[in-house]
Image (cartoon, helix red, strand yellow):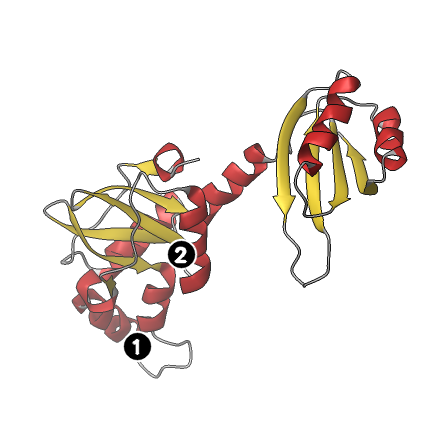
Amino acid sequence: MFVRNWMTIKPVTVTEDVPVLEAGEIMRKNGFARLPVVRDGRLVGIVTEMDIMRVSPSPATTLSVFEMNYLLSKLTVKDVMTKNPKTIAPEATLEEAAVLMRDYKIGALPVVEGGKLVGIITESDIFDAFIILMGLREAGSRITLEVEDRVGVLAEITHLIKERGINIVTIATFTPQKEGDHGQLVLRLDTEDPAALVEDFAAHGFRVLHVARR
């Protein structure tokens, strides 16, 4: 799954000279939390709701409404934006995007190709992809197994599923976080009655941790 397939193409942008109040209004009207800042189509920064909140006067200020609006009207996006933000290429994987967002504690990545801004991918896009990848909106069953880290274990499990004539929708593996722990295998299966298969797993030594039906 690649960034190109999940990003928002041609995102709404602003230039550096746009007033902060105008940028905030664009975000408010469109339900955005951030806006890429461009100069001749090239990314130079990103401005967020939080950036604008930081420069907005506190309710405890002694300034009048007129004075506050006057001061804010003098601020432009260039004054509050994050310069040279983290970016990602459209051919990068969603996993790479997720790691960047997590490591740098950011909610979105501008997507840049050939020096030009071509899109933006957000944490919501990653969540949507995860939901689809895991088949969470599909009818069927979800079975979580405890598995050993050994050659052939996945083949054994899929063979049992095949013998029952059940189609596999998705498979996800989770490696152990501590040494000595077992991993987990999450199966989304195209069946609403996995009882017999669950018995097969148990009979072949696989510990069934969880079963859910949708």
Per the image, label 2 sits on a secondary structure element best described as: helix
Dot placed on the residue nearer the N-terminal end, 1 or 2: 1
Q: Residue 207's spot in the image, x, y percent?
A: 83, 43
Q: Residue 55's spot in the image, x, y percent?
A: 31, 72
Q: Nearer the viewer, mark 1 or mark 2?
A: 2
Q: Residue 196's spot in the image, x, y percent?
A: 88, 25
On the rendered structure, is 110 left or right of 154? left
Q: Name the residue that disc number 1 marks.
A: 64
In the displayed orientation, state which residue is furthest to the left: 40
In the displayed orientation, state which residue is furthest to the top: 165
Q: Is residue 29 above or below residue 194?
A: below
The residue closer to the viewer here, 204 or 71, is 204
Tell me the CA gap for discs 1 and 2: 42 Å
In the displayed orientation, state which residue is furthest to the bottom: 62
**Residue 180, picture quadrant:** bottom right
Residue 208 visible from this viewpoint: yes
Residue name at image x 39 percent, y 76 percent:
58
Q: Amino acid at mark 1?
A: Ser
Per the image, label 1 sits on a secondary structure element best described as: loop
Residue 105 visible from this viewpoint: no
Residue name at image x 58 percent, y 37 percent:
131
Residue name at image x 76 percent, y 36 percent:
143
Q: Residues within 10 Å of mark 2 (few under 14, many from 20)?
A: some
Q: Amino acid at mark 2?
A: Leu
**Residue 189, picture quadrant:** top right
The residue closer to the viewer here, 125 or 183, is 183
Residue name at image x 52 percent, y 38 percent:
128
The numbered mark at residue 100 is 2
Q: Residues within 10 Å of mark 1 (few under 14, many from 20)?
A: few
